[in-house]
Amino acid sequence: MALKNLVVAANRLPIRQTYDAHGNLVWTTSPGGLASALTPVMEKAEQVTWVGWPGQNVSGKLKPFRAQEIDLIPIEMSAIEHENHYEGMSNGTLWPLYHDKVVSAVFHRHWYDGYSKINQRFAAEIAEVIDEDSTVWVNDYQLQLVPALLRSRAPKASIGFFLHTPFPPAELFCQLPWRVELLEGLLGCDLVGMQTPASARNFIDTLETLGLGASDGEVFHHKGGTTQIKAFPIGIDVAKYANAAKSAATEKRSQEIRSLLGNPKFVLLGVDRLDYTKGIEIRLRAFRELLADSEIDPAQVSMVQVAVPSRNNVKAYERIKSEVEQSVGNINGTFSTVGRSAVEYLNQDQDFEELMGLYRAADAMLVTPFKDGMNLVAMEYAATRFDNSGSLILSEFAGAAHICDGAQLVNPYSIDEIKAAILHAIRMDPIEQKTRMEILRNSVEAHDVNIWADSFIETLQSKP
Ligand code: G6P
């Protein structure tokens, strides 16, 4: 695969500006795994440029610069632009709409106007650095107008878009007042990648419902040309997690964690962004009922819930945070003893080493989102179980459910199903447990992220 000039566009740059303890602006790794997912293709490209938001709203000060062998082009936003584009249209309108309206989607014209303005800013910067040999990879729901804006300026460039979230059924998407604009934005692409075949079908179905063209298998014909639409389920860098899991430092930390928890017989773990799509509150209810019914003994079973802070300024996130925290307080008030909490709750980001220790310390991992594009946490946990220990309880509505054979699949809305799956994990026959984990690890390995990135770019380059 020869890649001359690769331009990545994503809402965030791979590094972001944050304030350190002394109030100085410093660069740190951005949240999310996009940079590591794209590393294999970035390494194969002669030149890589990444266009994105630098993480702070300090408009007009940052010039393009080079870091980690990538040319970085910061797209700055004022506080109000950030509010309209990111908190508003991206995370108040599109995020809930694309996750089956777990909470209501809010439609505001000024949010859309802000979104459109920021998308134009991205397109204008990208247009400056591309020619007809360039390959442009646009990522995610924050930038859906960018492809068509670019197409009008660079008719021959290869333009691909990957949606990291689900794409909703037509009847939901069609509620969006700007549905045609967003779809036509994506039709500027040669290739649109989705996480699952179901999302790819929803997308084609929506295009046809609105009469924007006609499909011929995975190729969609529209007035401006053709766009291929295909599922490319993302994966993780399996070797990175498997190797880290085997290190002496991880082994030591995982034993420390178990001993800090009071050496319980069984440790349940949840690791999520604190998002209302993740089903954390139902999971806690299931755990609470099991304790209340004496089905499990808080002296024998501990639960650790990591809830990484996210999108704090969006109303629905404030609400889910207080709901989860009330529930944790209630469980601990009722079932903890001095020095021993029934639920250990961490509303903080965890570094890679700590995450490895937690994964290795956990006998079962609970991943129960109401809706999720993929969910990489489920795969990360599996990749750390090199000895085939542990088990995974996984929502049937996560994209990962199509990949993670061997997991116990549950309906994340069913408290009873989650309770039964927890009990089954605790009481599982060792042969069933090992067999399931071996199957799970093999399926996660078969979807390594290197395969994902390569196959997306190869498909994009092999356009007719
Ligand atoms: C998650 C989603 C991505 C999304 C990202 C944005 O990782 O799966 O689809 O792009 O969040 O996170 P942010 O912190 O930038 O809102």
Image: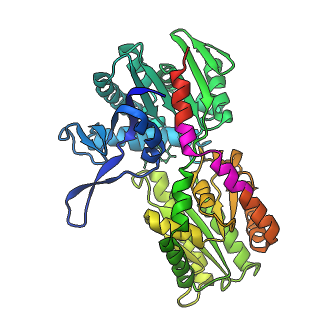
77 above or below 370? above
* Residue 237, x across and y down, in percent: 53, 50
Q: Nearer the viewer, residue 316 or 403?
A: 403
Q: Is residue 295 left or right of residue 146?
A: right
Q: Main secondary structure of the magenta part?
A: helix
* Residue 412, x across and y down, in percent: 69, 55
Outermost residue, left direction? 61
Quadrant the C terminus occupies? top right
Q: Nearer the viewer, residue 212 or 70?
A: 70
Which stretch appears magenta?
439-453
Occupied quadrant, residue 50: top left
Q: Residue at x 58, y 46 (%)?
A: 448
Q: Is residue 126 left or right of residue 225?
A: left
Occupied quadrant, residue 71: top left
Outermost residue, bottom direction? 338
Q: Residue at x 44, y 59 (%)?
A: 309
447 drawn magenta: yes
151 above or below 33? above
139 above or below 242? above
Q: Is residue 170 left or right of residue 239?
A: right
Q: Nearer the viewer, residue 148 or 118?
A: 148
Q: Residue at x 75, y 67 (%)?
A: 419
Residue 175 seen: no
Numbered marks: total:
0
* Residue 213, x across and y down, in percent: 61, 13
12 drawn magenta: no
* Residue 379, x across and y down, in percent: 61, 54
Q: Is residue 158 left or right of residue 395?
A: left
